[in-house]
Image (spheres, helix red, strand yellow):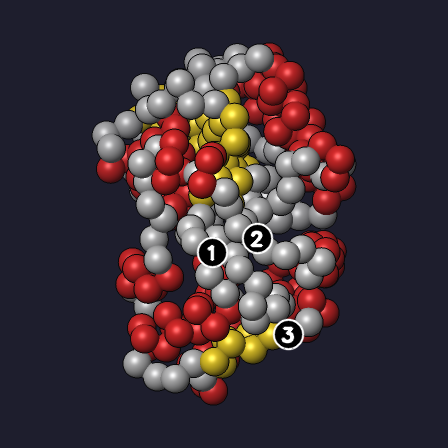
Amino acid sequence: MTYVIHGATGAQGAPVVAALAAAGQSVTALTRNADVVVAGAQRVVAADYGSTAELTEAYGGADGVFVHLPVVSEEDRRDYARNIVAAVRAARPARVVFSAGGAPIDPETSGAAAALAGGLAETGVPHAVITPTLFLENLLMPYVLDTVRERGALPYPIRAGFPVSWASHLDIADAVVALFDRPDITGVVSVGQYPAITGPDLAEAFGAHFGKDVVFEQITPEQFRSSVAPLIGEGPAADVAGAYAAMSALPDRSITPENSAQKLLGITPRTTGQWLTDMGL
């Protein structure tokens, strides 16, 4: 079995490569630079999201392809979604697993993730769509983690009582490997903690892990935008802030048990404390 992994050196792709390698599978790592060394990968291929031809060649003969959209402008993400769909339609890999990365896949949103999910369905290629809500790795950003360490506060742009089914990139990797092994499972698979937890629950877990009192601190989407812009750029940061502003109108970001990884795959995502330990913090 050969699996093609997008962003093999990135936040979502690297754990998938590691998990597949640990399972003894053959991995082709897609990166921007073919000269990079990717631990666990048998092949490294340079393939640009902007090139349908390169993607088509990379997907050819694959038993599975893991795709996700990078954190760039939404306009670029829409272009990349179209190219991925065209390449899947042309190359016909045996299976595709797409992580929406927390972006909505409802067609009414007209977003890139929705376009990619809908486009994959139209290709007729067997596929599954992983729908996490928020990533625990967001809490590793310097603005957040440094504040926890320096003054015992965990800042984040959600209401204190807003329940979220947090997931980690490690949980996504577990789900991807399981879905590659379970072609009978198609459609949407939600990955995240259930029951969902609140900001103070997060703070309590951080406090227990670091052995100190930690309180949750609600910040505005604009404050969050200014903190992440130096890391991801002004355009993507504005898109992220807009997503959190829209989220503020929702009652929660909880998964439902019916299509959860817990039910469909028998996988229970890590608790916040388990994740902190696994990350070696």
* Label 2 residue SS: loop
> Residue 153: image x %, image y %?
49, 81
Q: Are marks 1 and 2 in contact (CB under 8 Å)?
A: yes
Q: Are marks 1 and 3 in contact (CB under 8 Å)?
A: no
Instruction: Determine which residue is flagged by label 1.
Output: 196
Instruction: Determine which residue is flagged by label 3.
Output: 219
* Label 3 residue SS: loop
> Residue 40: image x %, image y %?
30, 38
- Quick one: quadrant of the C terminus? bottom left
Local crowd size for mark 1, using a 10 Å CA cut-off: few (<14), some (14–19), many (≥20): some
How far apart in space, not on screen, are marks 1 and 2 (Cα)? 8 Å
Residue for point 38% across, 31% down: 264
Question: Reading the chain from its start, which is encountered first: label 1 or label 3?
Answer: 1
> Residue 230: image x %, image y %?
64, 66
Mark number for residue 253? 2
Residue for point 71% across, 32% down: 107
